[in-house]
Amino acid sequence: MFEQLRFPVIAAPMAGGPTTPELVAAVTAAGGFGFLSGGYLSADALEDRIAKTAELTGEPFGVNLFVPGGATEADLGGHIERWRAEADRYGVEPGEPKWDDDAYAAKLEVVLERKVPVVSFTFGTPSSEDVERLQANGGKVAVTVTSPAEADRAVAVGADALVVQGFEAGAHRGTFTDEPGAEGGGAQYGVLSLLRLVSARTELPLVATGGLVHGADIAAVLAAGAVAAQLGTAFLRADEAGTQPGHRQALEDGGRPTAFTRAFSGRPARALVNRAVSEFSATAPSAYPEVNNLTKPVRAAAGKAGDPEVMSLYAGQTYELAGSGPAAAIVDRLQTEAREAVTRLSRLR
């Protein structure tokens, strides 16, 4: 699935705008692999993006889907009022804090109809029946896992590969469940530790992700047993990425720490610390996608206003080391750095 790549780097699916057909096509053209993000899109919008990407590249690419969870029983009252006050500042209405399934069933039909060669899943496992349908259709299934226990569940439903996500990763943790009392929603493993633990219990191909922005990071996870490295933050400032200008500027400026927060979506996600993260995280409920639907119009208004203090500035821990420019140049740099890292390892001979 990924073992035949000219360079074992994967552009992560970044929902909400950063991942574009142009970014996926550019990374695949440079010898890597790209995932389109299906999260937050309608089925029609996803089909359009698949078609656009296919027009831009003749190489295979993947699609990522969010596995829906159940509706929340958490009290959202206080969080709603906090975001209503923010909405008033921008002259917009907050969204309705309702549950939805992210059009999961309809988007699954889209990837089946389009015969997408690799479909990855985040926030849980698809049913074994859905896995079998995708595989019978000629596709491969990858599941994002954040713990050994989640890896076991993904193996049990018949996944073809696992995306092993360390706590260093930017944006949402792929945890199957969100434990309200846990800062990151559950047990936290660094990418190398988790990679070693999971590789000891399954022979499935493993893709490592989480805080990887340098070629030496890619060399490290390959040495630890991964077949490829999945990078998101490394491509946030790529020319082809759809990252908002205010988000790009905050990444370029640097200096902000990162932290897990449920403030924007109701699920733990690593973001640059801004006023919303500082003021709302402690009381933000575990309520996804209700909180995401609530805050979406406000965050969009903040983006238009160029106000980084209320935007969801998702990024991995090592974001300050990521570069900018055309995606092909970023991949070339990563290749050079990876080769240099391998040369340094020659001392072990």
Image: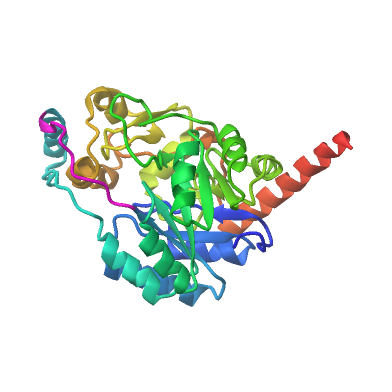
What stretch of residues is rendered in magenta?
A: 67-77
**Residue name at image x 45 percent, y 26 percent:** 257
In the depicted structure, whether residue 122 falls above or below residue 82 = below
**Residue name at image x 13 percent, y 34 percent:** 80
Tell me where residue 179 appears, x and y as whole percent: 31, 30
In the depicted structure, whether residue 235 falls above or below residue 252 = below
Q: Specify whether residue 195 is in view.
A: yes
Predominant SS along the magenta part: loop
**Quarter of the image containing the N terminus?**
bottom right
Q: Specify whether residue 147 is in view.
A: no
In the depicted structure, whether residue 151 falls above or below residue 197 = below
Indicate left or right for 22 with 85 as reference.
right
Indicate left or right for 245 with 318 as reference.
left
Tell me where residue 343 appears, x and y as whole percent: 82, 42
Tell me where residue 234 appears, x and y as whole percent: 54, 46
123 drawn magenta: no
In the depicted structure, whether residue 320 falls above or below residue 7 = above
